[in-house]
Image (tube, helix red, strand yellow):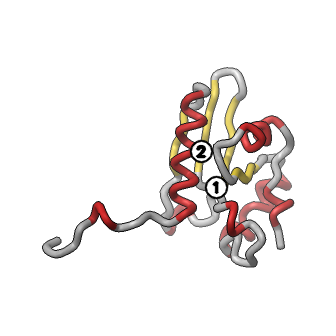
Amino acid sequence: MPGIKTDRIRENPEALVQKRIIKMLKARDWYVTVMHASFALRGIPDLYAVHKRHGARWIEVKDPKRTGKRSLFTSAQLETFPHWSAAHIQIYVLTGPEQEEYDKLFRPGNWARYLV
């Protein structure tokens, strides 16, 4: 569009965190699918990652600066995530590409710890 410099439009902080997490996972041989937001995918975690040895993981990306905020999860996620957990589907919240965040993928899902 004329007059709009798209290269200057800043991405939201969570999108930047997501890019770093994807880069970190790919460097460790994970195949990552971004689950783009749409009405049909309401309540679905941000990423679906698979690894030939470690299996599959559903990953919800959160900005580490917002993890104490009330609006951490959408209403659709607050409806969906408990049902998935009841069905033994693990959901992992990651807040960055650091090793301690990566290590969370090898423990039980942690999304409920982020409820405020």
Which of the numbered marks, if any, corresponds to residue 61? 1
Q: Which residue is mark 2?
A: 21
Query: Considering the image in quadrants, where does the N terminus appear?
Result: bottom left
How many numbered marks does the figure carry? 2
In the figure, 64 relative to 49: above or below?
Answer: below
The kind of residue tagged 2 is Ile
Q: Residue at x 13, y 73 (%)?
A: 2
Q: Residues within 10 Å of mark 1 (few under 14, many from 20)?
A: many
The kind of residue tagged 1 is Val
Relative placement, left or right, of 115 versus 2 is right
Relative placement, left or right, of 43 versus 114 is left
Q: Are marks 2 and 1 in contact (CB under 8 Å)?
A: yes
Nearer to us in this view, 54 or 12: 12
The image quadrant that residue 21 belongs to is: top right
Relative placement, left or right, of 98 versus 103 is left
In the figure, 99 relative to 73: above or below?
Answer: above
In the figure, 46 relative to 80: above or below?
Answer: above
Relative placement, left or right, of 93 versus 51 is right
Q: Residues within 10 Å of mark 2 (few under 14, many from 20)?
A: many
